[in-house]
Image (spheres, grey):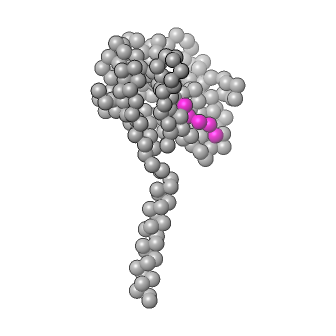
Amino acid sequence: MIFKLLILIPLSFVAASIWANEGKGGNVIVHEMNLDGCHFRLTDPYGGTLTQPGDGGPPVANYEAEINPEARRRFRTGIQFECHNNVSTKDLSSLAGIGKRDGRWIIDFDGDAEAANTRLYSLHGKGWEGAGITQDQAGEDGARRAFTFCIMHGSQALCGQDDAVMYLDYPEESVLPQLIRLLDSIEFVN
């Protein structure tokens, strides 16, 4: 009897550990989208959705997920993607407020970068590179930090924005690190 208990107790802990870890991470979803010539995959550990509206408007794709469901100030992450064809890094200033000089990504937009608390973030993935910026802005539901980015793949730029990666009253609940990991997972199919 003691021998059975010695075997069953460790097995119970192993099974409980596996089930606990399974619930935390959930299932990883690989979304695939062909957006106006930008054909890409996005590895999503947050259980979000990636859709294309069929409303006849400009071609966009929308990603939505609740990345931090434990936050005191809960909000859904929403990225709107656009594909720009036949562009170079010189065009990125007007698309995302970024540029490239001497091989380095820079903040490059018309406006006061210090007043908007603008910060630059490099993005890297399989066969592509890009950058994004955060800027603080006022909103009807509170002051928040927005993120705008472009990813270069050949002569295409996959660009996007998320109007709220953090509410300024709750900086510890920022989803920017998770969003950057999500974007870094992008893999172009073509």
Q: Is residue 125 left or right of 134 when viewed as pictured? A: left
- The x, y position of residue 106, in whole percent, is 42, 19
Residue at 46%, 77% (x, y): give it: 9
In depth, the one of 33 and 17 nearer the eye is 33
- The x, y position of residue 149, in whole percent, is 46, 24
Q: Is residue 167 magenta?
A: no
Where is 169 relative to 108, above or below? below
- Stretch in magenta: 74-78
In depth, the one of 66 and 29 nearer the eye is 29
Where is 28 relative to 82, above or below? below
In depth, the one of 170 and 186 nearer the eye is 186
Residue at 45%, 13% (x, y): give it: 93
- The x, y position of residue 141, in whole percent, is 69, 29
In the picture as drawn, the residue positioned furthest to the bottom comes out as 1
Where is 41 relative to 99, above or below? below
Q: Is residue 134 left or right of 102 when viewed as pictured? A: right
State the image quarter where residue 74 is shown: top right
* Most frequent secondary structure within the magenta stretch: loop
The count of marks equals 0
Residue at 46%, 72% (x, y): give it: 12
- The x, y position of residue 130, in whole percent, is 38, 25
Where is 107 relative to 30, above or below? above
State the image quarter where residue 91 is shown: top left
- Can residue 176 be seen here? The reply is no
Residue at 44%, 89% (x, y): give it: 1
- Can residue 110 be seen here? The reply is yes
Where is the C terminus found, in terms of image quarters? top left
State the image quarter where residue 111 is shown: top right
